[in-house]
Image (cartoon, rainbow, N blue to C red):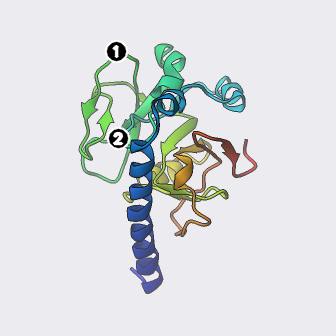
């Protein structure tokens, strides 16, 4: 690891700690109505976008991440929703189909995921959780690089980050392996970051 890479890694880790605190505090202090309203309905541009995609990737919220599964209830019932799946504590991640009513297992990283025997899927539109973001599509994730590796292996998939508005920062430190987002959805707005949407 070069000095520059080590500096970026340390910088990201400090940002993660600060942004996780900010996210935790914000989510814990949301009033009841705001909690009920946040991430329950897709904004019109996203509804139209989803109509053109066969399989959509989402995630089961962990901790104070926004819970987005209610937004995708119809897709999930139709068998068109896939969630991240980890076969073990390895670098690779895949997606597996999931429907409401099917149990979610505890994955090796502590997140909830579809069962090991759920059908594999390759989403062409992926909603991913964020620790931090900027308006140019920069993303700070949990630090394992799972989404960046998946995005790099599936460059055609559209990438939409999900986070609370308080997770926005001016600029995210970027490494060569970081893959930019196409858009970001917060409880307040839908932010376009590139020209693919």
Residue at the location (67% across, 58% down)?
136
> Which numbered disc, 1 or 2, marks the residue closer to the eye?
2
For mark 2, give the secondary structure: loop
Crowding at dot 1, Cα within 10 Å, few <14 / some 14-19 / many 20+, comes out as few
Left or right: 94, with 168 as reference point: left
Residue 74 location, x and y as percent? 53, 16
**Residue at position x 32%, y 33% in the image:** 113
Q: Position of residue 15 (x, y in %)?
A: 45, 66
Q: Which residue is mark 1?
A: 101
**Quadrant of the rendered image containing residue 51:** top right
Give how far apart the Cα atoms at labels 1 and 2 are. Answer: 18 Å
Q: Quadrant of residue 197?
A: top right
Asked whether the viewer can see residue 80, the reply is no
Q: Residue furthest bottom?
A: 3
Q: Earlier in the sequence, mark 1 or mark 2?
A: 2
Q: Which mark is residue 131?
A: none
Q: Residue at x 25, y 50 (%)?
A: 89
* Residue 65 drawn at (x, y percent): 42, 42
Q: Which residue is mark 2?
A: 62
């Amino acid at each position: 690891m070069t000095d520059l890479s080590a500096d970026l890694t340390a910088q990201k880790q400090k940002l993660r700690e600060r942004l996780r605190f900010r996210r935790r505090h914000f989510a814990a202090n949301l009033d009841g109505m705001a909690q009920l309203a946040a991430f329950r309905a897709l904004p019109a541009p996203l509804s139209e976008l989803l109509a053109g995609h066969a399989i959509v990737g989402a995630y089961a919220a962990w901790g104070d991440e926004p819970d987005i599964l209610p937004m995708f209830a119809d897709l999930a019932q139709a068998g068109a929703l896939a969630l991240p799946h980890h076969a073990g504590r390895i670098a690779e991640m895949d997606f597996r189909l999931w429907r409401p009513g099917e149990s979610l297992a505890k994955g090796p990283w502590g997140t909830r995921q579809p069962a090991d025997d759920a059908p594999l899927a390759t989403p062409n539109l992926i909603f991913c959780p964020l620790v931090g973001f900027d308006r140019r599509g920069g993303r700070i994730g949990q630090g394992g690089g799972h989404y960046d590796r998946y995005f790099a292996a599936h460059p055609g998939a559209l990438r939409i980050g999900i986070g609370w508005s308080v997770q926005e920062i001016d600029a995210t430190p970027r490494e060569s392996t970081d893959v930019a987002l196409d858009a970001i959805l917060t409880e307040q707005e839908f932010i376009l970051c590139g020209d693919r949407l």
